[in-house]
Amino acid sequence: MSKSPKKDAVERETFAAIERGDFKECYLIYNRKSSDEADSQKNSIEFQNAESMRFAARESLPVAGITITGLCNNGSISERHSGFKEDENFVISSDGKVTYQIDRPKFQRLLQLVNQGYIKGVICLCWDRISRNKSDDAIVRKLMKKGVDIRFVHAHYDDSSAGELHMDIDGMFAQHHSRVTSEKVRLSKVNSRSQGKCTYRAPIGYLNEGNMDWKPFDPERAPMVKEMFELYATGDWSLSDLTRHARKIGLTAPPMRRRRTKEEMLADEEVRLEKVTSPIQQGYMAQILKNKFYIGYIIGNNGKAGEWVKSESHEPLVDEKLFNKVQALLGKKNVSTHYTEKLDYPLRGIMRCSCCGRIYTPYVKKGNQYYYSRCKDGCTNKMKNLHYTYVVEKVRKLVSGLHFTDDELEEFESRAGTDIALLENKRDREMEVIERKKKKVRDELAYLRSERVQLLKTGVFTPEGYVEETNRLEGEIDDLQTEEQVSEEAMRELMKEVVHLSELLKNVVPIYDYANPQEKEKIIRAIFSELSFSHDTLQYKVKKGFETFDKRISAFCGPTWTRTTAAGFGDQNSTTKL
């Protein structure tokens, strides 16, 4: 809340007058409305201020007519804070000084003014308005002994042992009243919860009418909340899509007042805030689906240990069978198959950050498509945002290199005969080995069949073991016969397929140039399984079948003919500078 230049100048002059001592013979009025009590005429700010002003006039006590934003208005300080609660933290310095926090900001500034002698004294209604805890009580007593004149409208304390006793009794009763009030509220909650009554605010889908005995359905929101359970139980909705659907059908959180700002808390008059609704967030949706309140339970007295008790204050909104099904699905990572808004963004999910592995998420800004990576803390990647045209142009350079050049094809053809001849000689030697293995297996199989009865009688094999061993040997023969089926013609056909695929990849580039975004995506996904960006470097993984062109590895059963790349020999992961 900004102040006008004129008002700011007036307050500067007021502070200067205070420091000059213009008000050292004057009093300030202190009014406090307790935030832990029900509203009553005695404790209202207006009543306290009126009584204090009449008292000042009757006793001829001059009130300092000063106005300071966030402190006082025409000499009256009004504060809405609990006087019973206090900060339990304190610090003891090496020289014996004890420091602790005063939770009432205006009261704290008032004590500073009277302690420094800028103000003679304070006028308040009664003792429990200025202090209700022992720590603040000690400070007030020290100020009074120091000479600060603190007057009370409803009490007078003589400067004697009787007056001290009177003050002790009032302070004791003020603290006792706060403790009794707190104890009554706590015991009332414990007793009500043990009876199944809801002592707290009911969640969305129910109405809060100030009655803990009955929490009726919200006729507007209850059907929508039930629909959220039913949709999620199908297993086709993720939390994010369910949240979007809730916003689309108009499901909002119940009206709530926002937290008061510091300026509003220090205002002389109480600020009445309007209740406003807010859209459902994904985290809030998860809380809804996990809340047992919707199946007729409330949090018990041992809520920290997860205790739930049967409610007498409300009826269940969903049945337990549906609720348990939802809980089982919440434990899994649901992937939605139902999108309320289909977003046709190409290259979704294929691009990652090379440093931390986070996905680049597509988004549109001013008609242009970008990709953004919400990298992990400490990630060194500086390329958080990528433009769509930037990505497809860099991928085009990769695609244009994934085929054999004319020189490579010529070398490939010239070496084909030599490679086949070498492989044929190797195949002949392997065939001899295979034939010897086959003969050995056939001999073992013939022995099993001729001596079957004897082997079974002597217990060498059980019937099941005999069948298993026979099947094993027959399987070995089948495997050896499969190895013999490799031929020179098959190897030539394989080489023809490699050359044909190279030509197809070469023709992809002009098609890629004129393709729309969706067609470009199909081409990219057909060739690459992943793209990774970091700094000025693009890393990629090609799908199985394209390694030959990426690393120039021969299509035969090993690197018989290779061309080394900068990224490393025989690796499917490649790197290129952007």
Image (cartoon, grey):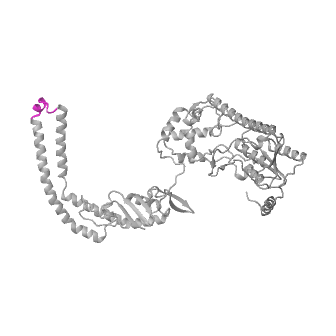
Quadrant where the N terminus is found in the figure: bottom right
Q: Quadrant of residue 23?
A: bottom right
Identity of the residue furthest to the top in this view: 195
Q: Is residue 355 visible?
A: yes
Residue 2 x/y as whole percent:
74, 59
Q: Which residues are magenta?
A: 451-461
User: 277 and 432: which one is in front?
Assistant: 277
Magenta stretch: includes residue 493:
no
User: 73 and 296: which one is in front?
Assistant: 73
Residue 458 x/y as whole percent:
11, 30
Report the residue at 54% width, 51% height from top. 341
User: 201 and 386: which one is in front?
Assistant: 201
User: 282 and 299: which one is in front?
Assistant: 299
Q: Is residue 549 left or right of residue 229?
A: left
Magenta stretch: includes residue 457:
yes
Residue 224 x/y as whole percent:
60, 40
Quadrant where the C terminus is found in the figure: bottom left
Q: Is residue 214 visible?
A: no
Q: Is residue 451 left or right of residue 559?
A: left
Identity of the residue furthest to the bottom in this view: 407
Counting every numbered tag in the picture gives: 0
